[in-house]
Image (cartoon, helix red, strand yellow):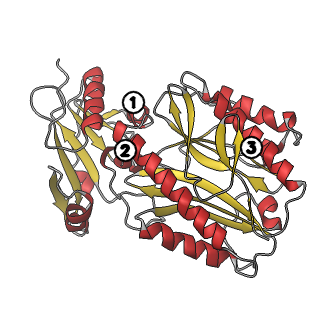
Amino acid sequence: MTVPAAPTGLPWQEQLSSLGAMAHMLGVDTVVLSNPLNLSWFTGARWHVPQTLSPACFDVIVTDLAGRGTPSVRIVTNTIEAPRLRDTEFVGSDVVFDTVPWDEDRARLLPSGSNVARDASGTSHLDASEEIAALRRILTTEQSAQIRELSRDTARITGAVAAAARPGETEQRIAGRLVAALLEEGIECVALFVGSDERISEHRHPLATAKTIEDRIMVACCGRRSGVVASVTRMVAFSPLGTGAETYRRLLEVERGFLDASVPGAQLAEVFAKGVAGYASHGFDSDEWRRHHQGGLTGFNPRELIANMHSELTLQSGMALGWNPSAAGFKVEDTTLVTPSGAETLGDETAWPTIRVGGRIRPAVLELH
């Protein structure tokens, strides 16, 4: 069986080639994608209607993967979403739309049989969820470029909003500004935390409240554009940090442990263990890591796999990570890309104070007083 080349009329060349190789290995001809993460990976499209619900509004069917013809892509959706998807998400793409009335289940249009693989369990097809997830976790060349650009934009925007915050303003006002600023550049805010003062240490996921800012603020978000997701945290202090400056520097050394270990071939559990060992090594409580997860695999979700001592994933070049160590009222976070030469931290520090740690430029706490 010959693995077919990806058709030139479709934009997803690397994804189609990967699915073709997988189909050859599994002995199938057709692949159906329904998982939102896989839809983001394959199409880069906005698969949702309400942002707060996980079900996707379309499925993707890729046929003719066995080498007997040129692979084709079909989008299965309902009559409400088809015009929008065609006009905004798949403009210029050589795809066919199969639609059902909005009050009917589109599942009836999805193929089944022994030659069909899907990213879902079931008895009417081959469950290829794990195989497809393995493909998705290594970004394509285009997606690597997209996540670099998105990380720079998200960091720049988050930094600008954080730097404009002032004591007396509410956390909710800052959160609203950030969402608006991100949307102006086509970035959906899929996770958002704004905490001030004691709430930073008391609540590691501080959803914004009506509390007014007094002395310090943390602004953190995950932004999505073209399917990929970038994470960032920035902090501002409105009075001298004093000994807090050294505390934050020690936290950056903890982060360095995660970053230095994030190389191709490393086991995620080993990276995690080396990272959390840094808390005690740099003067924090050895159990500090138990107060908040430390991050893990990202790419198409804020965190696809949260790392722990039992994570079995082997890191490969092209995977995206988001490490977010925190302690003593401080947190540091940027998106990281695993490359052949090690961890590449992504972001934009051109308008933000920085500290060099382990040869990397890392964000400092912005002091405004």
Seen in the image, is 8 located left or right of residue 287? Answer: left
Tell me if residue 222 can be seen. Answer: no
Seen in the image, is 320 located left or right of residue 260? Answer: left
**Is the residue under label 1 in contact with that under label 2 (CB below 8 Å)?**
no
Q: Quadrant of the N terminus?
A: top left
Q: Check the image and name the residue furthest to the bottom.
A: 168
Label 2 or label 1, whichever lies nearer to me, is 2
Q: Earlier in the sequence, mark 3 or mark 1?
A: 1
Amino acid under label 3? Answer: Leu
Residue highlighted by disc 1: 131
Q: Identify the mark at residue 16; answer none if there is no mark.
A: none
- Residue 92 pos. (x, y %): 17, 55
Label 2 or label 3, whichever lies nearer to me, is 3
Q: Give the secondary structure at mark 1.
A: helix
- Residue 54 pos. (x, y %): 45, 58
Per the model, the C-alpha gap separating discs 2 and 3 is 31 Å
Q: Earlier in the sequence, mark 2 or mark 3?
A: 2
Q: Check the image and name the residue furthest to the top.
A: 1
Amino acid under label 1? Answer: Glu
> Which residue corresponds to the image point at 32% horizontal and 44% vertical from the top-left?
42
Residue highlighted by disc 3: 252
Tell me if residue 195 can be seen. Answer: yes
- Residue 38 pos. (x, y %): 37, 44
Q: Nearer the viewer, residue 263 or 296?
A: 263
> Which residue corresponds to the image point at 81% horizontal and 71% vertical from the top-left?
215
Seen in the image, is 105 located left or right of residue 10? Answer: right
Q: Earlier in the sequence, mark 2 or mark 1?
A: 2
Residue highlighted by disc 2: 41
